[in-house]
Every structure is written in C-alpha cells, then in structure tokens.
Amino acid sequence: MAEKDGISRREVLSGGLRGLGLLGIGTATGALATRDKRDDEVWQIDPDACIQCGLCATECVLEISAVKTVHSHGMCGYCELCTGYFEPDPINLDEGAENQLCPTGAIERTYVEHPYYEYRIIPDLCVGCGKCVKGCNMFGNGSLYLQVNHDRCVDCNRCAIASACPAEAFRLVPRPTPYLLRGKEEA
C-alpha cells in the first residue's frame, strides 16, 4: 500500500496502540497508588458534624448498620432524667419500654445511687438510628454519639452512608486510629 504524507497506516496503528498501552499503565499505576493510600484509611463519623438524621440506620450496605452509638462515660452526667434514654416528657422515670427513646432497647440503665444512673450501650441491639444521640445532644451534654464500628464495617470503597450523609460528617481517618472521640475516654 502506498504511503500518504510520509506516514503509513501501520505506523499510525502502532503509535496508537503504544499510546493506549501507556495510558493503561498510567491508569493502573494511579489506581494502585490510590488503593495503597486508601488501605491506610477508614471511614468514620465526625461527632461534631453529625446531625443525627437517622440515615446511618438505613443507608449502610449491611442489614444492621455498622454504625453504633458509643457513650463517653467521662462526659456523662449520670442523670436520673437522661434525655438520650427517655422519651421527651416520659410518663415515669422507670425502665418501661413506653418511656425509652431507643426503639430496640439498646441502652441499659443501672442505678448507682440517688440521683445517679449509669447508662451502657448494648452494641448488638443498636441499629445506629441516632435517636438517643439526638436527645443527648439536644438536652444533655453530648456524651452519646455515633461511630462506625470497624469490627462490623465491610470497608466500602466509598461508604454508602457517607454518600448519603446530608451533613458530610463522614471522613477518612488513619486506620491505626479509626475513631473520632468526644471527651477524654476512648470508646
């Protein structure tokens, strides 16, 4: 076949294939570099940015969300009327289900001495709805807050909850220190 303007079809195809090969190698290298960086980080909720919208309970790819309520005992007032435990205007200040804010009974209340009570989160019952967190932040001291439980998290490339979060409260944090805590005590 005759050449036109000094470049053969074979040279054009060969150059194009080399270019595509280099583009593929560059893309693969970039993906691996990003993946290596991503392997060093995990998704977590910034407790100061969270607005307790309730999406953590419904947007996680798991049937029961990897997001759980944690309790900073160092911040807690051990109140008799805990606004993270009780419905607003409870009928009585007792443990009856009709008085509890948590729909799954994931908060255990234990008498310490008058007028103090200790509150403990039962992770297996917590669905991450954030109702207790909202009550604690609205009327209490914020000792209850939501965090991604990394023992349950399947480490999505782009966390489904983070994508849906209206407050953009999710962020990548270093894997060795995966929790963003309130108060001085670790969760």
Image (cartoon, grey):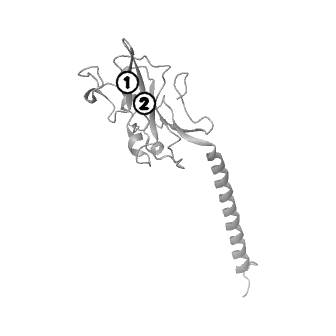
Give the CA distance from mark 1 to mark 2.
9 Å
Q: Which quadrant would residue 184 be assigned to in this image?
A: top right
- Nearer to me, 96 or 152: 96
In the displayed structure, does residue 185 sit left or right of residue 83? right
Q: Which quadrant would residue 113 be assigned to in this image?
A: top left
Question: Label 1, on which residue?
Answer: 109
Of all residues shown, which one is farthest toward the right?
6
In the displayed structure, does residue 176 sit left or right of residue 86? right
The spot of residue 6 in percent (x, y) is 76, 78
In the displayed structure, does residue 64 sit left or right of residue 10? left
Of all residues shown, which one is farthest toward the left?
91
Instruction: Name which of mark 1 and mark 2 comes first in the sequence.
Output: 1
- Secondary structure state at the residue bearing disc 2: strand
In the displayed structure, does residue 78 sit left or right of residue 39? left
Quadrant of the snapshot with the N terminus: bottom right
The spot of residue 42 in percent (x, y) is 57, 42
Above or below, comparing residue 140 to residue 171 in the picture:
above
Question: Label 2, on which residue?
Answer: 121
Q: Amino acid at mark 1?
A: Arg
